[in-house]
Structures are given as structure tokens and as C-alpha cells.
Image (spheres, helix red, strand yellow):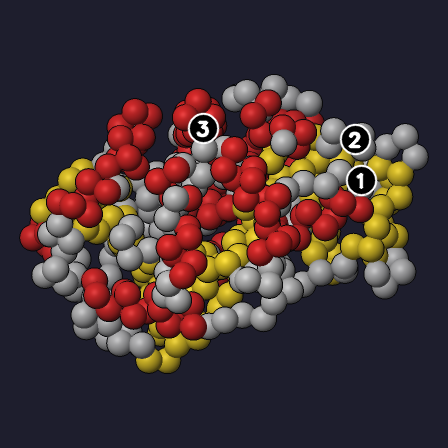
């Protein structure tokens, strides 16, 4: 018998390694290749400063205007909108001031642990070289743009996350390719980047297998249970016996939890990137421009441009106009950027309406656990999720209060 982890992205693979290291016999199961979902195309950022809840009023009040703008940072498919109404109602309910304070603290508690968990994981697996030393620059054209982002900065100050304000000239000393239109920047030194996020997932899977872990390919059709979970059934007719099952399938987790009679309000925030292998420039830091809603990261042997949110469900085809919008905006910050030898990608980021992940035992089926909904912070939270879920599954006391992340909080 074994612990079956469903989902071989960065969340599931990190947890599989952690549990195998602790003596569990683990099977890592995915319908595709290891790390080919959102873990393949994320923006490669350890974004410890980005835990601010998306449900705050300053965001959701802009959504109607964004939806009317074909190049806005948020697009909602009209055909999918009726299915989103219950999710949006919970999203707005999470915007009460008292609730926002709780959600900020819950996100900060996870982000404060990130390097305590990530650095040991990278050292023990020999993967320290995958993490860069440079941080992230947040860009602003002028004081008005900076003031518009002041809420974010104040939250970081409240929770003690380091940052440093720079003039435009000081920012260009760090990144000479930045446009002269950048008047202010903020350096987030802890927001370091990965040299290649997909390569990291594959390397972790290799370390997991070297410890005796097993990787299986297959799509889940259902589950067997008596008084607790007993097996995972696959669409090809196979059955995998299981003492425990952990659902780590990202945006696909809601479909699996529904099979267990435990629906969750999980949606996909479809994200896009353009990976440019001949950009004509070099960069050391990642950059974000809040007012333009894009990010640029040097990663995977080139420069990756991403951003925007699309709400259109799991099954709609990609709309690569979203990728072209972010490249257009990136050139406002990086005027010498060329888009040559490039690929475009779309992936599914799992999003709960309160922006906080679920890391929890099932409320209905003994032996089932959930680790999903990490949103834009999957790679950021991966090692911490592995530590906390490892404690939860093995019965060790976690270092933080896990009640805010339970499945039955909705």
C-alpha cells in the first residue's frame, strides 16, 4: 500500500519527495509528463511579496472596466461568466476589511517561511544552482503610479518584508535596458528567480525516484473507499491501491474533489507567457510593472514575458492575443526588446476566491488530503507546502496554525 499523490507539478512533486524522504512509499501520478502544466510556464519567481489578497476592493472595483478593455489585465469569457457567478460572490465576500486582514496574515505566514523551507530542499537535492541571487524590480512611471500601489507596499511594511525604493536612475544602474520613462522603482531583494522552473520540477522528480518513489502515468476516473480511501481508479482500467491519496492537481483538483463528494470553489486563472530566446537584450533582475500588469523574467535560457488573467474555464482553447498584449507592454519598459525565436504558452493557475490555498485533510473522506489553490504562488509555496503537508500527513505538529487553510472553510 502507498500514498498516491495526484498531480506531478511543483506542488505534488515537492510533496512526493518530502514524504518519500520521511519513509512513506509514494506513487506520483499524473495524466501527462512531470511538470508540464502550470509548473512548466510559470514566471519562475519566488514571489514572497505577492501574497496580497486579490479580493480587495481596489481590485474588484476595476474589473468591469477591465472587462470592457480588450487589452485589459483581466478578461472574462462572456460564455463562461454564468459559471463564475458563485465564485465571484465568494470573491466579493472576501473583500470585507476584517476578512482582508485575516487573509493577508495567512498569506504572510506562508511567505515568511519560504526560504526556511526552500533553501534546505535545494541544498539536500543538490539544486542550489537553480536559484538566482538577484531580486525583482517593481516599476512606476511617476509618483501617481507609485501611490496607486502604496497599499501593497504598506502591507509589506506591516509584515516586515524587505524592500527599497529607488529612483529611475538607480533602477537603470541595476538594469540598463530599462526605459527612461521609469521614474521610480522598488527593489524586492527576496523575490529571487529560478533559472528554469520546469527543469527544477524534473530534477526533483528524479531525486524522488532515486529514493525509491514511483512515477505513474494515468488519468483518474474515480476512487474506491469503504470507511476510508482504498484505491485510485484510472481511465485505462487500472486500479492503484492506496492508504492515502493527496489531491495536488492544480486547477483540475475541483473535478477530482467532486468525485469524492467534496466540491470546492476552485477556478482556473488562465495565464500566458511568451518565451523569447533571441530577445536582443540581457537582464539580471525580474521586473514587474503593476500599472501595466506584466512581468518579465530572465529564465529557461531566454527572457519570459507574462501577465494578465483570463477566466474562461479549463476547456476553452488558448487566446494568444493575451501573450501579444504583454509583449507590447513589456516593450514600454524595455524598448530594445526584440521578439525573435519565441514560443507562446497558456497554463491554468488554480485560484480560490480568497487567494489562500487549501492544505488540509478531507472533511469527508478519511485518508484523503488536498494541497491545491496556490494561485500565482505555486513555485513560491512549493517547499513550504511540502513541509506543512508532510507534517499533516505523518502526524507531526506543523510549525504554523493550519486551520486557515482547511478545505471546509468555504
Measure the alpha-carbon separation of dots 3 and 2: 29 Å
The part of the image, by quadrant, that contains residue 396 is top right
Q: Nearer the viewer's eye, disc 3 or disc 2?
A: 3
Q: Quadrant of the N terminus?
A: top right
Q: Earlier in the sequence, mark 1 or mark 3?
A: 3
Q: Residue at x 52, y 22 (%)?
A: 400
Specify whether residue 205 is in view: no
> Number of labelled discs?
3
The part of the image, by quadrant, that contains residue 217 is bottom right
Q: Nearer the viewer's eye, disc 1 or disc 3?
A: 3
Q: Does 357 sit above or below residue 313?
A: above
Residue sitting at the far left:
169
Give the secondary structure at mark 1: loop
Measure the alpha-carbon separation of dots 1 and 3: 30 Å
Q: Residue at x 62, y 43 (%)?
A: 86
Give the secondary structure at mark 3: loop
In depth, the one of 242 and 212 nearer the eye is 242
Per the image, the residue denoted by label 1 is 261
Label annotation for residue 96? 3
- Circles 1 and 3, Cβ within 8 Å, touching? The answer is no
Q: Earlier in the sequence, mark 1 or mark 2?
A: 1
Picture coordinates of residue 219, whole percent (x, y): 76, 59
Picture coordinates of residue 139, whole percent (x, y): 21, 51
Indicate left or right for 183 with 293 as reference. Answer: left
Specify whether residue 371 is in view: yes
Q: Earlier in the sequence, mark 3 or mark 2?
A: 3
Indicate left or right for 309 with 222 as reference. Answer: left
Per the image, the residue denoted by label 2 is 364
Amino acid at each position: 500500500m502507498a500514498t498516491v499523490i495526484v498531480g506531478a507539478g511543483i506542488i505534488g512533486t515537492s510533496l512526493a519527495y518530502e514524504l518519500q524522504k520521511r519513509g512513506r512509499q509514494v506513487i506520483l501520478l499524473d495524466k501527462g509528463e512531470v511538470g508540464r502544466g502550470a509548473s512548466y510556464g510559470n514566471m519562475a519567481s519566488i514571489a514572497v511579496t505577492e501574497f496580497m489578497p486579490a479580493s480587495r476592493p481596489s481590485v474588484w472595483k476595476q474589473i468591469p472596466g477591465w472587462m470592457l478593455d480588450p487589452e485589459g489585465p483581466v478578461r472574462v469569457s462572456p460564455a463562461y461568466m454564468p459559471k463564475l457567478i458563485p465564485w465571484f460572490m465568494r470573491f466579493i465576500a472576501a473583500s470585507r476589511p476584517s476578512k482582508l486582514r485575516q487573509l493577508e496574515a495567512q498569506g504572510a505566514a506562508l511567505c515568511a517561511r519560504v526560504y526556511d523551507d526552500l533553501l534546505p530542499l535545494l541544498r539536500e537535492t543538490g539544486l542550489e544552482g537553480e536559484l538566482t541571487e538577484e531580486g525583482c524590480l517593481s516599476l512606476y512611471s511617476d509618483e501617481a503610479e507609485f501611490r496607486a500601489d502604496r497599499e501593497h507596499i504598506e502591507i509589506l511594511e506591516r509584515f516586515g518584508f524587505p524592500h527599497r525604493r529607488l529612483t529611475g536612475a538607480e533602477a537603470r544602474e541595476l538594469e540598463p535596458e530599462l526605459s527612461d520613462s521609469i521614474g521610480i522603482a522598488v527593489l524586492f531583494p527576496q523575490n529571487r528567480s529560478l533559472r528554469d522552473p520546469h527543469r527544477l520540477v524534473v530534477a526533483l522528480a528524479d531525486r524522488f525516484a532515486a529514493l525509491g518513489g514511483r512515477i505513474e502515468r494515468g488519468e483518474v476516473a474515480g476512487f474506491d473507499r469503504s470507511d476510508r480511501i482504498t484505491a485510485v481508479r484510472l481511465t485505462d482500467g487500472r486500479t492503484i491501491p492506496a492508504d492515502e491519496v493527496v489531491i495536488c492537481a492544480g486547477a483540475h483538483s475541483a473535478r477530482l474533489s467532486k468525485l469524492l463528494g467534496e466540491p470546492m470553489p476552485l477556478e482556473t486563472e488562465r495565464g500566458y507567457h511568451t518565451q523569447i530566446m533571441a530577445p536582443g537584450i540581457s537582464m539580471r533582475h525580474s521586473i514587474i510593472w503593476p500599472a501595466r500588469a506584466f512581468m518579465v523574467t530572465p529564465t529557461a535560457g531566454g527572457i519570459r514575458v507574462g501577465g494578465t488573467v483570463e477566466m474562461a474555464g479549463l476547456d476553452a482553447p488558448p487566446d494568444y492575443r493575451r501573450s501579444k498584449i504583454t509583449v507590447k507592454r513589456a516593450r514600454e519598459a524595455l524598448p530594445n526588446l526584440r521578439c525573435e525565436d519565441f514560443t507562446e504558452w497558456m497554463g491554468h493557475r488554480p485560484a480560490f476566491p480568497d487567494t489562500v490555498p487549501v492544505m488540509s485533510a478531507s472533511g469527508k473522506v478519511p485518508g484523503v488530503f488536498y494541497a491545491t489553490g496556490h494561485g500565482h504562488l505555486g513555485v513560491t509555496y512549493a517547499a513550504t507546502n511540502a513541509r506543512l503537508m508532510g507534517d499533516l500527513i505523518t502526524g507531526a505538529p506543523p510549525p504554523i496554525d493550519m486551520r486557515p487553510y482547511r478545505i471546509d472553510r468555504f
